[in-house]
Amino acid sequence: MTLIKTLMAGTAMAMALAGAAAAEVKVGMITTLSGGGAGLGIDVRDGFMLAVEMSGRDDLEVVIEDDQRKPDIAVQLADKMVQSEKVDVLTGIIWSNLAMAVVPSVTAQGKFYLSPNAGPSALAGRGCHENYFNVAWQNDSLHEGGGAYANEAGYTNSFILAPNYPAGQDALTGYKRTYEGDLAGEIYTKLGQTDYAAEIAQIRASGADSVYFFLPGGMGISFLKQYADSGVDIPVIGPAFSFDQGILQAVGDAALGVRNTSQWSKDLDNAANVAFVAAFQEKYDRLPSLYASQGYDTANLLISAMEMADVSDPDAFRAALKAANFDSTRGEFTFGPNNHPIHTIYVREVIKEGDVLTNKIVGPALVAHSDVYSVDCKM
């Protein structure tokens, strides 16, 4: 595995690797940089590092490692970062099964964990911790928006499917929480599955009037391509993970017109988002994704806390994180009592701008939305 030590804001990479003086705050980023989910981790990393660079700070060090989407590797890396690298803050994990393997251990050791993506329900309720902050969403949230939109669209018989791991289970739980119709079928697929012929055959025979699916990364690409080729014309709905910027280019025109739910979109009209989208395109020569926006927000939350408190004073630093005194790409952002966001979930539609597939906001699905698990969080 490759270790990258980066001292931003004008400090040359060579100096960092040569053993420059330790930064005041050291961050360990464990994320997925290889395999089928690499695009998600790369976008989180790139968004995070862009915010660090734009801040101009020279007191922040970031150590980046590839978890290969394997829980055992993530645990090994977390142990190394806490015990050998002596990091103050950890971040970066994409997948909820990896988060469940890492977060409880590192927070119990007094480290802060800022999640730029995974938000399993087990860490939002009884398993919450004062040092764990989710800067993305609780897993159910976007799917609850999907259920609310399905009601508005008049769907009454949805077929729903997701991978069989914590985020997939949370996804369908969230959809069913707000959706008021019947279910034509409910399937949990294998994590990492690429062949969906059997599932599509079940959808075809189900009598469904809509399909709701959560299949992030390469899984979503495979499903959408096979679904389009199948000739099944039942409309699909999904969360942004299944219709995000990287996925859309791989799927192609089959995604046009599909409605999906997100807490972020590149066309959100606020100053922080406009600056982020422009800076991301300038630096990386591609449109940002949902994941990139979450990485960017996570870094800016951390930087805002650094401006208010010293990480060596855990109580003060925790209070500074809780204040969320930063300009989020999604606009208004506050933490609920369990350190998960309160925010708006939007409905988006896949469109084409020139030759590029992207999303535009249609309207809100849920406003000032918070998760249901916070009532069980005692901290």
Image (spheres, helix red, strand yellow):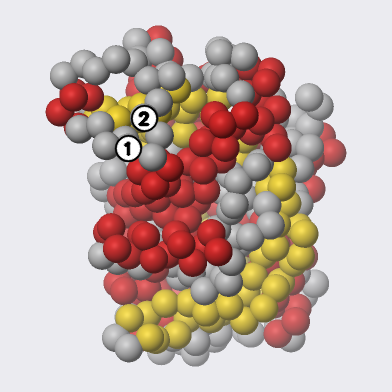
How far across and how far down the image is residue 296, in percent?
Answer: 46, 49
Residue located 22% across and 24% down the image:
16
Residue at the extreme right? 375
How far across and how far down the image is residue 117, in percent?
Answer: 51, 46
Amino acid type for the residue under numbered disc 1: Ala
Q: Residues within 10 Å of mark 2 (few under 14, many from 20)?
A: some
Asked if one can make out residue 114 in the rendered structure from this viewpoint, the answer is: no
How far across and how far down the image is residue 284, in percent?
Answer: 27, 59
Q: Of callouts 2 and 1, which one flags the residue occurring earlier in the amino acid sequence?
A: 1
Q: What residue is pinned by disc 2?
A: 58
53 over 282 or under it: above or below: above
364 over 241 or under it: above or below: below
How far across and how far down the image is residue 9, in percent?
Answer: 32, 37
Q: Residues within 10 Å of mark 1 (few under 14, many from 20)?
A: some
Amino acid type for the residue under numbered disc 2: Asp
Viewer-proximal residue among 225 and 247: 247
Q: CA distance from mark 2 to mark 1?
A: 5 Å
Q: What residue is pinned by disc 1?
A: 9
Tell me the quarter of the image containing the N terminus. Answer: top left
Q: Quadrant of residue 236?
A: bottom right
